[in-house]
Amino acid sequence: MMLYRGLVVGLLGAIAMLIASKPVVVPAPAAAPSPELAAPRDTIVDALAGVGGVTALLGLGAHERIVAIDDRPCDACEDELEIRWRLAIAREYVDVTIATPRGPRRVLLLAHAAPTPPAAAR
C-alpha cells in the first residue's frame, strides 16, 4: 500500500511539473479593421408601405448614391424609388443597390401594412 501511495504521489508530482513548465502562448488580439477600409454592410429596412420619404430610411452617406433598383440601373433612382415605394403593397420588397466609395452595398426595403386597430368592444 505504501508503494502504491508513493507511486501515485510521484506521478502527480511529475504531472504538476510538466504542467508548470509548459510555456503559455497568449495570442495577440487581432486588430479591428478601420471603418474606412471595412466592406459596406448589406441591410434590411422594414417600413410602412406607401409612406413617402423612403430615401431617408436608406441612410445614404455624403458620397453614396442609388445606382440600381431591383438590379436594373437607373438615372433618376431616387425619384423612381419614391414612386415605386408609394405604389408598394404589403409584403412586397424593393432591392436597392447603393454605390459607395468602398464598393456597392445593398438595402432590402420590406413593405408592411399599417396595423389594424382592434375592433370596438360591444
Image (cartoon, rainbow, N blue to C red):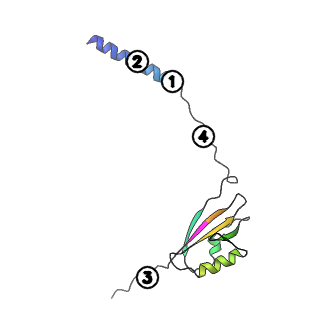
Look at 51% across and 78% down and name the residue there.
90
Q: Amino acid at mark 3?
A: Pro
* Residue 84 forms part of the magenta stretch: no
Q: Identify the residue under disc 3.
A: 117
Q: Identify the residue under disc 2.
A: 13
Residue 3's spot in the image, x, y percent?
29, 11
Q: Give neighbour class at mark 4: few <14, some 14-19, many 20+ (Cα, 10 Å).
A: few
Look at 38% across and 85% down and name the residue there.
119
CB-based contact (under 8 Å), mark 4 and mark 3: no
N-terminal label among 4 and 2? 2
Describe residue 112's horizontal placement relative to residue 104 as left or right. left
In the rendered view, tell whether residue 110 sits above or below residue 36: below
Measured Cα–Cα span from mark 2 to mark 3: 74 Å
* Residue lying farthest to the left in this orientation: 1
N-terminal label among 1 and 3? 1
Q: Amino acid at mark 4?
A: Pro
